[in-house]
Image: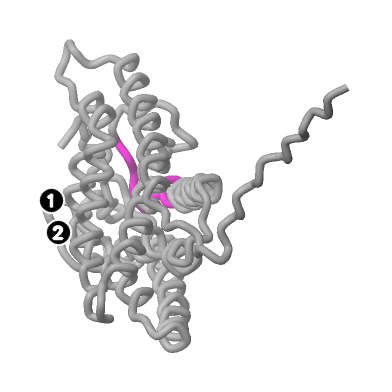
């Protein structure tokens, strides 16, 4: 892990806010499941439920993300001793709160619920995809600005371009991951022959989650973990903007894989103007 001080490890967890995050997030997940079940019945596809399952299973990979991006979930009691977090497992000495799985489902599967069918039907344009990307970035920022501001967890690395305690580059990477997973998930949905084929979303999630965050975020990851004297805030600024730029390119690339609109709704070709014959004088 990066340059984490003992103060970060011994920082007390706000258990009241931990309860808010736990119960509120799992309540939202329950609503998502109800919506997914209704969609499954009306559209005769398990796609929406499988997207929720894929994000939930993929949450077990969160510790890899935590190590790379210097994320620490607070676990200390008021006296600095560990054991305050309601966690379901620990990896790399980082506790994983119960709400990490619900948080994954909300952040990464929600777009499949509200935009998946639109993409499937070929009604999503490149502009629409970028609009959803910005919406997902904004949602990520709101959630994590709150989380990092109420003593639930922190990004302790030497980030630049923070909103409060939250590094903006993280929100951009998360929003990009949502776009990559959603577009790939819909492409799988369109190609499988049976409902069980949508189970391919389960491996697709970590491929886009880890591939997107590490593949697009490697400039900021390396910049954060350079050893002295190589490390400097200027390099972190550069890594931040390079990763953000790579994210924009990735969303642009994902837009190339959007399904085409139905033939009966495709714009009709524009007929050339009639050519007037010149009448001889």
Residue found at the very far left of the displayed protein: 92
Which residue corresponds to mark 2? 90
Q: Disc 1 on helix, strand or loop? A: loop
| Chain part drawn in magenta | 146-156
Residue found at the very far front of the displayed protein: 281
| Whether residue 242 is situated above or below residue 93 in the rendered picture | above
Image coordinates for residue 234, horizontal then vertical, percent? 34, 14
Magenta stretch contains residue 151? yes
Spatial CA span between label 2 and label 1: 6 Å
Assign the N terminus to one quadrant of the image: top left
Residue found at the very far top of the displayed protein: 229
Q: Disc 2 on helix, strand or loop? A: strand
Q: Is residue 146 visible?
A: no
**Front residue (pair 58, 92):** 58
Image coordinates for residue 218, horizontal then vertical, percent? 23, 32
How many numbered tags mark residues here? 2
Determine whether, in the image, residue 143 is placed left or right of residue 58: right
**Front residue (pair 158, 241):** 241
Dot label at residue 248: none
Name the residue rendered at 28%, 68% in the picture.
191
Which residue corresponds to mark 1? 93
Q: Is residue 237 visible?
A: yes
**Quarter of image, res 105:** bottom left
Residue found at the very far bottom of the displayed protein: 41
Name the residue rendered at 41%, 40% in the picture.
252
**Front residue (pair 214, 5):** 214
Kindly indicate whether the residue at mark 1 contacts the one at mark 2 (C-beta within 8 angstroms).
yes
Q: How is the model colour-coded?
A: one colour
Image coordinates for residue 67, horizontal then vertical, percent? 18, 43
Determine whether, in the image, residue 185 is placed left or right of residue 146: left
Magenta stretch contains residue 111? no
Image coordinates for residue 281, horizontal then vertical, percent? 88, 22
């Amino acid at each position: 892990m990066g340059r984490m001080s003992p103060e970060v490890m011994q920082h007390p967890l706000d258990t009241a806010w931990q309860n808010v995050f736990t119960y509120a997030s799992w309540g939202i997940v329950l609503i998502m499941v109800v919506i997914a079940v209704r969609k499954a019945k009306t559209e005769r596809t398990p796609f929406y439920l499988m997207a929720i399952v894929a994000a939930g299973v993929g949450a077990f990979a969160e510790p890899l993300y935590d190590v790379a991006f210097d994320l620490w979930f607070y676990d200390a009691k008021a006296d600095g001793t560990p054991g305050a977090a309601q966690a379901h497992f620990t990896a790399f000495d980082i506790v994983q709160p119960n709400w990490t799985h619900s948080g994954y489902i909300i952040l990464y599967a929600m777009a499949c619920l509200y935009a998946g069918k639109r993409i499937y039907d070929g009604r999503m344009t490149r502009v629409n995809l970028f609009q959803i990307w910005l919406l997902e970035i904004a949602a990520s920022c709101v959630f994590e600005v709150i989380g990092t501001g109420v003593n639930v967890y922190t990004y302790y690395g030497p980030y630049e371009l923070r909103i409060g305690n939250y590094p903006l580059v993280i929100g951009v990477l998360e929003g990009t991951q949502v776009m990559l997973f959603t577009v790939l998930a819909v492409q799988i949905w369109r190609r499988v022959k049976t409902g069980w084929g949508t189970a391919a979303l389960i491996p697709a999630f970590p491929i886009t989650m880890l591939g997107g965050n590490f593949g697009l975020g490697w400039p900021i990851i390396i910049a954060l973990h350079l050893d002295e004297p190589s490390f400097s805030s200027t390099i972190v600024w550069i890594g931040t903007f390079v990763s953000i730029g790579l994210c924009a390119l990735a969303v642009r690339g994902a837009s190339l894989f959007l399904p085409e609109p139905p033939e009966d709704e495709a714009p009709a070709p524009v007929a050339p103007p009639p050519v007037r014959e010149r009448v001889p004088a």
